Structure formats: C-alpha cells, structure tokens
Amino acid sequence: MAGPEWQSLEQCLEKHLPPADLREVKRILYGKETRKLDLPSRAFEVASAADFELQGYAFEAAAEQLRRPRTVRVGLVQNRIPLPADAPVAEQVSALHRRIEAIVEVAAMCGVNIVCFQEAWTMPFAFCTREKLPWTEFAESAEDGPTTRFCQKLAKKHNMVIVSPILERDGAHGDVLWNTAVVISNSGAVLGKTRKNHIPRVGDFNESTYYMEGNLGHPVFQTPFGRIAVNICYGRHHPLNWLLYSINGAEIIFNPSATIGALSESMWPIEARNAAIANHCFTCAINRVGKEYFPNEFTSGDGKKAHQDFGYFYGSSYVAAPDSSRTPGLSRNRDGLLVAELDLNLCRQVNDVWTFKMTGRYEMYARELAEAVKPNYRPNIVTE
Ligand SMILES: NC(=O)NCCC(=O)O
C-alpha cells in the first residue's frame, strides 16, 4: 500500500489519462464539475510559507425566484501531528494549537464561515496503544477546557463557527471520557457538543478501551450559516447515523476522521459521497495525515509482529454535494485546508427532483426495525 510518496488519486489520473478520458472518468467519479474558487493570492502565499496545501471549489445551485442563494464557505483542515507522540503532552497540545491557528488565519482570508478540524485533533491517535497514561491526559472539558477556550477566541476573532473534535473529559459525570465534537458559534459562545455514536472494533482502532458510545443522539446545530451536524469517523459506515442527522434537519454533516489506508481507503471516496446523495445534504469528510510512532510496541492481535505505528493516515479530505458532485480531495501527504463554497439551496432542489425524503418508507422501516431488535425476533425469510 502506498505511503506518502503517492500524492493523490486526482494527481495520478491527471498524469496518466488523455484529456477526453479524464473528462469522462471525472464525470463519473466526481459528478458535475465544481468551479475553482478564486481565493486571494495572499492566502496561497501564506499557506505555502507555512507548508500546507490550499484548495478551493464552489458548488452551484440553480437560481430561484423566492429564495436568494444561501451561500456558505466551509473549511476542512487536515494535518499531521507537529511533534512526536512522545513529546510532553502540554507541548504537543500547544504545537497543535499554533498549527491550527495558522491554518485558520488562512481560512479567514478565504472567507470561511464554518471550519472543522480532524477527529481528536489535539492529540496523536494513540488509541491503538491501549495504554491509559499519558494519552488520557489529552482529554479536556468540552465546555471550558483550554482547547475550547482557544477555539472560542479564534471563532470570535474571525466570526467563524468552529467544529472542534476532542477527547472529552466529562467532569460532571465522574470524569469519564468521550469522543466529542464541540461546536463553537461565530459569537464565541459554545453552542453545544455532540458525541461519537459508533466505536470501532476493527484493526488497531481500540477506542472502546477509552470511551463508550455517545449518549447525545443526533443533535443538529442552527448556526447563522446553516444547520450543521457532526458524524464522527466510524459513524460514516452507518447509513442510519447519517440519516438521523438529516432527519433532524442537517444541511451540512461534517465527518472528522482518523483512518488508515490499509483499512479504509477504498471506502473513503464512496461513503460520505453516498451519504450526501442519500440524505439530500452536503457532507465534509476529513482525515488526518501521516504516520504516528508510539514509544511502546503494541500488537494488533493478529499473530503478526508487534509494531509502533498505526499505519498511514491518508488525508484526502473532500466535500460532497446532494447532486452527487464532489470536490477533488486534498493530498494524501500534506497538511491542508480545503475551502468549499456551498449554496445550501441545492439540498431542497435535489430533494424536489429525487424525492428520497418523500419516497423513503420511514414508518415501515421503523415498524420493522422495532420488531427486529427484539430478542425473540425471527427474520422474515420465505421458504418453500
Ligand atoms: N477513528 C475511527 O473511528 N477509525 C475507525 C476506522 C475507520 O472508520 O475507517
């Protein structure tokens, strides 16, 4: 499996396909072409000096007579950890704050209204180790921890909604941990929080060692820039999880993730895109970048040798739209900011054409599911 030397699917297609073939391949793999955003040259200069990639695209909707365009710019941030995983905890957190602050400055230059960071962005993705200390020391209060306070300042300064996925320490309930995304309003107030509903039990993703499945349901946050929800990482494999955010009115669903190539790279371009189509909304898939090495070896419980890394986090963050179009991905190997301009009117326009909300048989599914979860359920299999 390719590591950082393989930059991206897009770069490979562009390098090898003749233009006519490339057009057709892109039509199928990426849908209607997204327009390149004209971002300020200063933003590109700052991004380049700070060694991160900047890309911008716009999704368009048809003009309506009664509604004005509902245009919003989202920013997706992917990054590697700037310090090694065995550096002191406070230094790692501080280095990540500085890195994200620099990227958010550029997001502000690009007119971003809502920015979302990657899953557990203030720490290395240490859940593979199954060790408690020092990793649990990265957990913070969602309401008033140092990272939330840091994000509040940024949100207010840039008039930007910030989605900040962290490892949460819940002091009000016995100091337990959660995998949480804090949503901070552009006013700087904490609008609320949402928790990861599905915990992976696959490969080295040993996350149930640290926290349990979220207990906050499927909240949707009304912001001045649209209704948003956060489906954290492994939740993207669960169509009903996306559905319930959509049923609660989400127009944009962020999917902050941490996932590796050997496990999920072939699923990555499909799942968030499919969710955008199936739920008539925009989805924003964000993945971290690079390899993270841990001080102590761990095994994957598969009879193979112990090792000190998880595998390769392949970045490739992208935005998908309800009409099946999507942006190209950020690269697999660099920190990056993807800016996407969305016209939220597209959600209802596609809904009116494809009518999934109208043709979905929710009452039938609800009835049958209610039966299927009963312990004495007998599957409805017809035999001769
Ligand atoms: N962080 C996380 O839930 N990763 C699980 C692996 C995957 O969903 O690809």
Image (tube, rainbow, N blue to C red):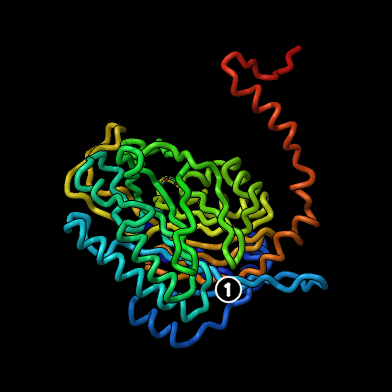
Residue at point 36%, 36% (across, down): 208
Q: Label 1 neighbourhood size at 10 Å, few (<14), some (14-19), many (20+)?
A: many
Q: Nearer the viewer, residue 228 or 145?
A: 145
Amino acid residing under circle 1: Tyr
Q: Quadrant of residue 369?
A: top right
Q: Residue furthest bottom?
A: 41
Residue 190 appears left or right of 366: left
Residue 207 appears left or right of 129: right
Residue at point 70%, 60% (across, down): 347
Q: Position of residue 55 (x, y in %)?
A: 50, 74
Q: Position of residue 109 (x, y in %)?
A: 47, 81
| Count of numbered marks | 1
- Asked which secondary structure carries label 1, the reply is strand
Residue 8 appears anywhere in the view:
no
Quadrant holding the C terminus: top right
The residue singled out by tag 1 in the image is: 57
Q: Nearer the viewer, residue 238 or 195?
A: 195
Residue at point 57%, 52% (across, down): 220
